[in-house]
Image: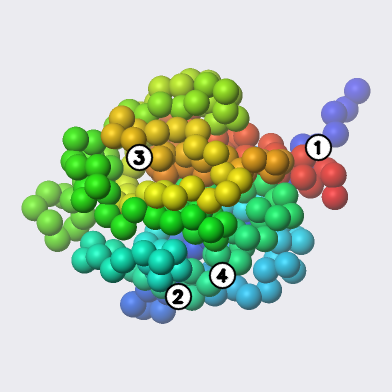
Amino acid sequence: MTQPPTLSPLIGITTYGRNADNKFTLPAEYVDAVRRAGGIPVLIPAGETKIDTLLARLDGLILAGGGDVDPELYAGNPHIEIYMIDPERDGSEMELARTVAANGTPTLGICRGIQVLNVALGGSLVEHLPDEVGETITHRNPPPGHAQISSYALHPLTVDGESRLADILGATEVIPASWHHQAVRRLADGLQVVARAEDGTIEAAELSDHPWLVAVQWHPEITAADDPSQQRIFDAFVQAARENLQNK
């Protein structure tokens, strides 16, 4: 008997803000990871205002990495290391985050994405991690222009064994690729911490009472092609989006 075709859900992925050439960009690794999982990627340029119309046509959302959230949005303090503040991107992603948290759209937050979700729901951020947790754990290697060549940092973290994320990864100890100098400070109501680095930094959170919302501080897309545990994050997310599509 012929099996019915597998549904391919539409996965929205937020892009970086406008660059100096007036272009919206996104690293291809996000698209590749979604395609490997069976989803159809749809890029969402920063500044979109028709959020309800957009989400009605999507089956899942990825809040991608990128520059820092404006500290004014969480009553934070200016810092010399804060970079790429983008009011256009902040505005659209904050609205996206609040909407998906409320309407149950399957959502994956990555790096900046976990920070956007936390701020949108009322939490705050650590402006610059080395100032508060030191540099025993390297969360970000020196960026371009510093003494060393830029690259993603690798460090171990521990995942709550009772979490959705641990089920997805198939492990409670992982060493993913990181590139961040900020992290969650005050956790927003409804979010639960499900992973931490050895220095106490919050590395992942899930939203209670949501069908599927997982946010990680690291970059699973960077190693997903070679690390099955990181690809499984995208596989599980796209499967949740597929089920969302089936139930529409």
- SS assignment at label 4: helix
The disc, 2 or 4, on the residue closer to the chain's N-terminal end is 2
Marks 4 and 1, how far apart at CA: 34 Å
Label 2 sits on what residue type?
Pro
Instruction: Tell which tag, 3 or 1, sits nearer the viewer.
Output: 3
The disc, 4 or 3, on the residue closer to the chain's N-terminal end is 4
Coordinates of residue 235 in the picture (x, y in percent): 60, 35
3 relative position to 114: left or right: right
The residue at which mark 3 appears reads as 201
Marks 2 and 3, how far apart at CA: 26 Å
The disc, 3 or 1, on the residue closer to the chain's N-terminal end is 1
Marks 2 and 4, how far apart at CA: 9 Å
Marks 3 and 1, how far apart at CA: 43 Å
Marks 4 and 3, how far apart at CA: 27 Å
- SS assignment at label 2: helix
Nearer to us in this view, 234 or 115: 115
